[in-house]
Each structure stands twice: as structure tokens, then as C-alpha cells.
Amino acid sequence: MSKKIDGKLIAENLRSNLKKQIIELKEKYNKVPGLAVVQVGNVAASSVYVKAKTKSALEVGIEVIDHHLENTTTQKELIALIESLNNQENVNGILVQLPLPNHINEQIILDCIDPKKDADGFHPLNVGKLSISATNDENLLIPCTPYGCLLMLKGLGIDLTGKNAVVVGRSNIVGKPMAQLLIKESCTVTIAHSKTIDLEKVCGQADILIAAVGRPEMIRENFIKEGCVVIDVGINRIEVDQNNEVKTKLVGDVKYNELEKKAFAITPVPGGVGPMTIACLLRNTTIAFKNSLNS
Ligand code: GUN
């Protein structure tokens, strides 16, 4: 049986650490970090994430500036809001929940966010800094989900140097920044994706497997090597038949009950990557706040 990586607990520790830091900063500077949370429309999953992010931010002492806009909001209106948040002194971090409605170009919006206030680390300048810098240093605004995955890997206390890491998924939000972070840990990194030939064989080489494909329970027991570490980024809601009643449940991109027999360690869904993503968002907001005090 493998070790279950407790993302919930690691995230709790990270949040209590941030809470202490924020109390100290408040005593010293008489202000707290501010996070603007922007949601456009009512995609159900986005509403769940935004609610969870807001609750966690408030709990650690971050001020939340909430902007929930109609689905019909134009790109121009959204840009105007972001520009005003860029200039608002009490706003240190700006989070625009993705996906945005189809009539809005996400990249144009992300490009408008002041890179110093980029709580998600999605602005091209921060993407570039992540790729260039040799270390994952304290001032960088790093995309939250992959950084949370890295913290969980580091928490295992294993030496990552030279390990074969396979990232399944090439998104800008997870796959690509995850690869950058692992390169800096001196892993040998492969990015696999939907067009990869013989995905099973590629995954079979992994000492560390990061699954970020968004396809429920796609990674099966026969994909992995005995003793590897599995980080499951997927959060998929599926329908299951329970005593002739159709219920929904959350599952990851890996078939947990198969892989847990073979892996050295594995993250559960829920309770693995999800809470870490939120804790890392709060970390980025606090970093942006501290950077603003020094500038
Ligand atoms: N949608 C899915 N994941 C994320 C994330 O980490 N940040 C934002 N802003 N939107 C998302």
C-alpha cells in the first residue's frame, strides 16, 4: 500500500504560517494583503473555486475585493476593471478565474494584469521569469497548482535530482509550469499529452508522474512503475450508480484504488492538489504584498 500524500494537512500548515506572517506584517506596517477576485459569469466549478479561495483568504487575514460580473460583460469592460485594480493601492493580488466566456480573449486579459499583482503567475513576464531563473526563489509569482504539487513532492523528503518526471498535460496553467519547476529540481522531464505515442510506455518510465489531463481515471495501474510517486491534478465530477440511484462524485485523472497498490506515494482526490492550489494563491498574494512594501 502506498503513502497517501495529505495535501489538506500540508496546505493547513502553509496557511497557518501565512496567517502568522500576515499578523506580523500588520503590526509592522498597519496594513494587510488585498486580493481582488474576479469572476465573469456563473460556471459552476468556477463558483465553487472562487468561494473556497475567498474563504481561505479571509481566514488567513487577507482582504478580499470581490468582483462578480455578468456573463455578458464585454472584454473592454473587463480590461477597464483590471486597469482600475492595477491602480488600486489596497489590491496586491489580482485573480481572474478561468475559464472566461468565449467572447473574451483570455490571453489579452492576463496580459493586462500588472505583473507585480499577478496572483496566479500567468502573466507572460512571470512565465518568462519562472523559465529563466535557476531557482524557485522567494519573490517569484509561480502558478499555484504546479507549485503546490512541488511542495507535496518536497514534503516526501526524497531526493528529486536526476529522477524521471513525466508530466501528462501541456496546459499553460499546470503542465508547462510544472515542467519548469521540475527542471529546476534537476529532474529529467518529459511532457506527454493527448497526441503522445504509446503514453503507457512513457508513463512507465516515470519515477514521478504528474497527471493533469482532465480525463477521469484515465491513468490505470498498467501505466506506472512500481514504487513511483503519483500526483493527481485532475478534479472530475462523474456520475455513479449507488443502490440504483445516480449520484455524482469527484475523481482524479488516475484510478486511485489501482495505483495505490503499486505507487510509493499518491495524492487523493479530493484532499490532495486542490487545497494546495488555494494555499499557494494565498502565498503569492502575500509575496506580492511584501514585494510592494519593498518597492
Ligand atoms: N481555473 C482553473 N485553475 C485555475 C487557476 O489556478 N487560476 C485561475 N485563475 N483560474 C483557474
Image (cartoon, helix red, strand yellow):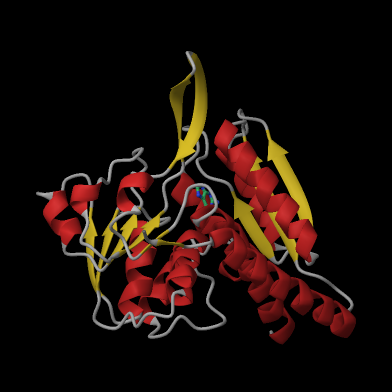
Q: Is residue 58 above or below residue 101?
A: below
* Viewer-closest of 19 and 260: 260
Kindly identify the residue that appears in the image at 73 percent across and 59 percent down. Answer: 57
* Viewer-closest of 46 and 236: 236
x, y (%) of residue 262? 28, 57
Q: Is residue 269 above or below residue 177?
A: above
Kindly identify the residue that appears in the image at 29 percent across and 82 percent down. Answer: 186
x, y (%) of residue 89? 78, 67
x, y (%) of residue 279? 62, 63
* Viewer-closest of 95 and 209: 209
Q: Left or right: 295 with respect to 165?
A: right
Quadrant for the N terminus in the image: bottom left
Q: Is residue 54 above or below residue 244?
A: below
Q: Is residue 209 above or below residue 268?
A: below
Q: Left or right: 228 with respect to 156?
A: left
Determine the image quadrant of residue 181.
Answer: bottom left
x, y (%) of residue 231? 39, 59
The residue positioned farthest toward the front in the image shown:
1
Quadrant for the C terminus in the image: bottom right
Kindly identify the residue that appears in the image at 42 percent across and 52 percent down. Answer: 233
**Visible residue check, residue 118:** no
The residue positioned farthest toward the top in the image shown:
244
**Visible residue check, residue 67:** yes
Kindly identify the residue that appears in the image at 34 percent across and 61 percent down. Answer: 176
